[in-house]
Amino acid sequence: MKILVIGSGGREHALAYTLAASPQVSDVLVAPGNAGTAFERKCRNVPVAADDLPALLALAQAEGVALTVVGPEGPLSLGVVDAFTAAGLRIFGPTQAAAQLEASKAFTKGFLERHNIPTAGYAVFTDAKEACDYVAKRGAPIVVKADGLAAGKGVVVAMSIAEAQAAIRDMLSGALLGNAGARVVIEDFLEGEEASFIVVAGKDQTYVPMASAQDHKRVGDGDSGPNTGGMGAYSPAPVVTAEVHARACREVIEPTLAGMAAEGRPFQGFLYAGLMIDKTGAPFVIEFNARMGDPETQPILMRLESDLVTLLNAAIDGTLAANPPQWSADATCGVVMAAEHYPATPAKGDVIAGLDAGFGTSAKVFHAGTTLKDGHAETSGGRVLCVVGKGADIRAAQAAAYAAVDQISWRGEFHRRDIGWRAIARLP
Ligand code: AMP
Ligand code: GLY
């Protein structure tokens, strides 16, 4: 069968690579893809933009695509799932109404409150003065978030009242994020350790968890500096113990799926809960995404031993219980190699050297911000590659990842040297 993957990042390369590994699959079309998917076995890039719904639909129909998998949030919040479903095409992802869980932080905070799902206390503002007064009363640290989609850049964890007020003014002035910043959500600061808890949600509130992961959002070693889309991730996340896992299912995932169904927005697709786990092991929702994480997808899928096509079809058909995913006992560690000046104004157009080095079976290079030019890969975005290493434990996985990272270079390239450090610190 033919599969269509929508998107062009590292997550989509990992999805395409994993779907192509299924013996059920003859071709994976990637719209629009990157230099990595261009060369992947069974994969083919198609020059259709990820948010061009009519062209995506026409492509799927013309090619006889049996299953479409949506990578990024953009097309989901535009209603790509609604459009494909209305045309009788099989697609895995949430409807536009369900994707609100990611598209609007204000919707999500209200939803969490309505359904008693644990999250930080908050208030929503459109007026800068009212927001600043609230922050002055509430104190710091405090968190200021733009309401709309801001590609991971709409959040400021302010350590002082002045910093929070500056962020409020920046966002509400529209200068920084345009419309995405027209409303701000101000949240109490949560203390603990973060985890990315992603489930495959299927028909009738059925679901199965993916392997746990932890993302490194800050740009610098030791989790310092500004937030990014993610500088690396690893799986499993030891903070998600069996008990935390059970609590995340019971206290977050199940009431969320039930609540969305009760509100007439049943959620089917990858549901990503960004959790803060406190000292007692209690999970709090920081955010939801209506898709897989990037870069979490890359290390998570490198541990998947069962067939991803079977899993996603089972979700759509409501047969997940009979088709649970199988995970490798190995750990994986994904290191993002970024372009100069990321996350602010990443450089583009640099030629990447070393991609043809032999990386063996313990590392895999996923492309993100790359394009093909004259037969070679050039940088075209902030997060350029995600190099995933696999090993018996996180230390071995990290070593495998960096051995591959050290063979690749381009002008201005940089990466963190400590992806996985929290898990390594827990090793005996
Ligand atoms: P978000 O885009 O909502 O996931 O926020 C980005 C990052 O900001 C999160 O991964 C956390 O590291 C941090 N963050 C967001 N909200 C809070 C909060 N209420 N308390 C502490 N840290 C937060
Ligand atoms: N890595 C965080 C995200 O995908 O939102």
Image: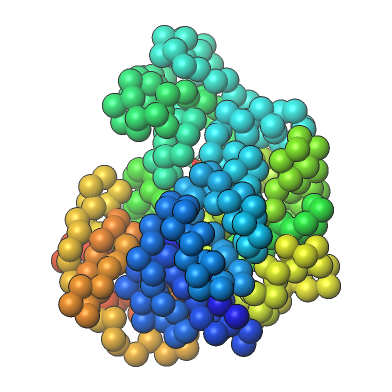
Quadrant for residue 382, please give it: bottom left
Left or right: 264, with 137 as reference point: right
Residue 72 versus residue 352: which sits nearer the camera?
72
* Relative side of 221 to 303, left or right: left
Q: Quadrant of residue 370?
A: bottom left
Left or right of 114, for residue 196: left
Spot occupied by residue 276 in the image (x, y as percentages of width and height)? 61, 44
- Residue 192 visible? The answer is no
| Left or right: 420 in relation to 115 | left
Point 34% across, 90% down: residue: 358
Q: Is residue 39 visible?
A: yes
Residue at horizontal 38 percent and vertical 48 percent from the top: 228
In the foreground, 1 or 324:
1
Q: Residue at x 77, y 65 (%)?
A: 317
Residue 34 in picture, x, y percent from top left:
35, 69
Vertical order, 40 against 423 (above or below): below
Q: Position of residue 162 (x, y in %)?
A: 36, 19
